[in-house]
Image (tube, grey):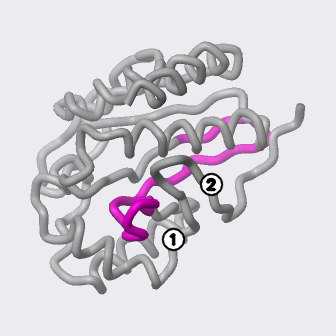
Amino acid sequence: MTAKPPAPVTLTGTRVRLEPFGPAHLADLFEATGRDEEVWRWIPVPVPQTEQQLADRIGTWARSGFLPFAVVARETGRTVGLTCYLDISADDERLEIGGTFYARSVWRTAVNTESKLLLLTHAFEELGMGRVCWKTDSLNERSQNAVRRLGASYEGTFRRSRQRADGSWRDTVYFSMLRDEWPAAKARLTERLAAG
């Protein structure tokens, strides 16, 4: 199968709906995540203090090739986070999932698991990708554990790879999942979501 680049699309699960990010999502997203130092701790940009700063940040990402999705809780209809496809190459059948952050109220819930299940299903089964990867700060153990629970494999650590918002240098941890690993990972994730 030849991979195709992702386009804005809505992906619907049981608990969340991923929608192409737009102005209608901004107020909820800022209310849920803006000014929260802990939410933004590992994202290498300054913490947004206004809705406009958050809109500018997401706009910058979108102009640099990110495809942002608003994470909408189906029960409330409120935007509780953002997640993106980025570093996309259909020719090389690969993309990255990143630019992800959620309201603290949904940490340690099924929101991240279902969001990633939707993104991975779309990437492997509909877009024909052969590789999906994640990158995270080496100090961000919560994110690394979440990626491991998805079934991704640790690939290595790039030392002093980028500067954090506070000016210090981060090492970046790389993970990936390949197309032939996806069926087993999908079964585990689906089972985990069904178990609650």
Could you tell me which residue is drawn at 56 percent across and 48 percent down? 13
Q: Amino acid at mark 1?
A: Phe
Looking at the rendered image, the quarter that the N terminus falls into is top right
Residue that badge 1 annotates: 21
Residue shown at 57%/68% (left/top)? Answer: 20
Residue at image mark 2: 11
Principal SS element in the magenta part?
strand
Q: What kind of residue is marked 2?
A: Leu
Q: Residues within 10 Å of mark 1 (few under 14, many from 20)?
A: many
Instruction: Answer left or right for 91 relative to 104.
Output: right
| Residue at 28%, 27% in the rendered image | 159
Check disc 1 and report its element: helix, strand or loop: loop
Counting from the top left corner in percent of width and height, residue 67 is at 57, 60
Residue 73 percent location from the top left of the image: 41, 59
Q: Is residue 35 above or below residue 121?
A: below
Callout in the foreground (2, 1) = 2
- Which one is nearer the viewer's eye here, 169 or 112? 112
**Total number of numbered discs in the rendering:** 2
Precedes in sequence: disc 2 or disc 1 = 2
Asked where in the image residue 113 lies, by quadrant, the reply is top left
Q: Is 6 situated above or below 22?
A: above
Question: Magenta stretch?
Answer: 71-96
Image height of 153 relative to 142, above or below = above
CA distance separating discs 2 and 1: 12 Å
- Magenta run includes residue 93: yes
